[in-house]
Image (spheres, rainbow, N blue to C red):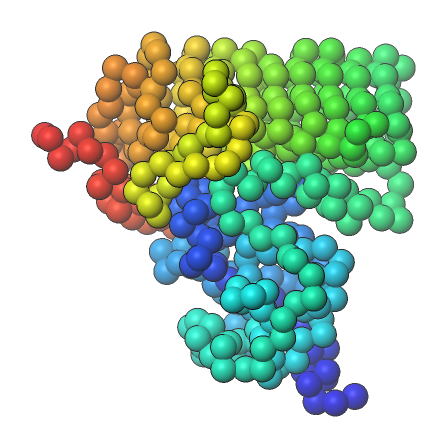
Amino acid sequence: MDSGRLFYFCHMENILLFDDPSFRGSLLPFTFTRPVADIRVGILKISEKWAKRSQGSVSFLTQDYLQAKFPRAKGEHIAINGAWLPDAASWESVAKLQPNQSLFYGKVLLASYIGETEKNLSKAAEKEVVQISFEPVLLQKSWNIFQYNGAQIREDFELLTAQRESAPIGDPHTKIYAPDNIFVEEGAVIRAAVLNAESGPIYIGKNTEIQEGALIRGPFALCEGSTVNMGAKLRGDTTVGPHSKVGGEVSNSVIFGYSNKGHEGFLGNSVLGEWCNLGADTNTSNLKNNYAPVKVWDYIKGGFSNTGLQFCGLMMGDHSKCGINTMFNTGTVVGVGANIFGDGYPRNFIPSFAWGGAAGFSTFQFPKFKETAQAVMARRKLEWTELEEELYQRLFESSKNYRIWEKNT
């Protein structure tokens, strides 16, 4: 075995997932509070996909203000683009990489070795360039999260369930279609529901609950500790992240985790971050009346950009919430820590730490935001830490430019 291959076998368990600056800004508001690789697409986060594929540990190379919460492990690493959604071929291409090589797709850096003292990947271009032999799946835009979700559920389902046996569904009043395409983890409780996996797999995580009258079509994922409320109508290509509650009608949407859409109302072609809450009868429009392509707020451009999509709903950052009967127009982007309420349609771009709705906005002042966040996290028996405080205080200050009403006071 040559020295390069020996290096690989000794160090491949150390994976460092880096934020690609070309993509990170286009994944806001979700990357305000996490590295790119901490985004959930399919059943798993991107970081969890790489950990499963490599059977090793992963850490992050991200923005300075996020690094304390998402630490970088010590030692030499194989650095991998955090926007890369891996499959078996992806892992094989990384596994073949030598320490003196860098893996590219065109001009996009996919992987390279990085030393313990290197703060970035500036030396990657100096190495021998290896071009990947296929087109990788890269998460480049916020709407890619729901756009790729169905395919990623399928990928993750195969990865998580291979050579494993599903727990039984013993409830006699639950109707199942395509049972071989359904996997239930231990501790899940299902009562009088309909699970139709003919169009794609259904994954039911540990200690979850699916209540009476729920209608679920695959591809669908319900992650650990989450609940589907009575009478929910959950269409395909949808993921409900861990410790969340969902009800009403949901289609092709991703809920990262620790968030609630527990009541009636429609959520379609949308993404909710963590610690979000949609009040009863909240509805999102995902299709314009004239069927034109949807435009959404582009943080890089500082204006609206065309998604090219006919269907696009709501993008809501972490710790944002809305009151009952809220109506979100097509392609609405909500930042971090916003609190939305009142009659009518609020604007299509709602900055971080906004307070109000269609009638106008003021600022959700940081002490009040913190008080709410602490209360919400305490309900899940989680603590608001100093790291959380520093991170969100930083975001509060850095997002002032978007709160244009502050400039007029």
Image point (37%, 41%), residue name: 298
Left or right: residue 37 compared with residue 350: right
- The residue furthest left is 409
Image point (74%, 89%), residue name: 2
Residue 373 higher or lower than 329, as above or below: below
Coordinates of residue 324 in the picture (x, y in percent): 43, 12
Please tell me which residue lies in front, 83 or 54: 83
Coordinates of residue 343 in the picture (x, y in percent): 34, 10
Q: Quadrant of the C terminus?
A: top left
Residue 37 higher or lower than 237, as above or below: below
Coordinates of residue 49 in the picture (x, y in percent): 67, 53
Coordinates of residue 16 in the picture (x, y in percent): 56, 65
Image point (78%, 33%), residue name: 200
Left or right: residue 66 compared with residue 139: left
Please tell me which residue lies in front, 121 or 394: 121
- Picture quarter containing residue 389? top left
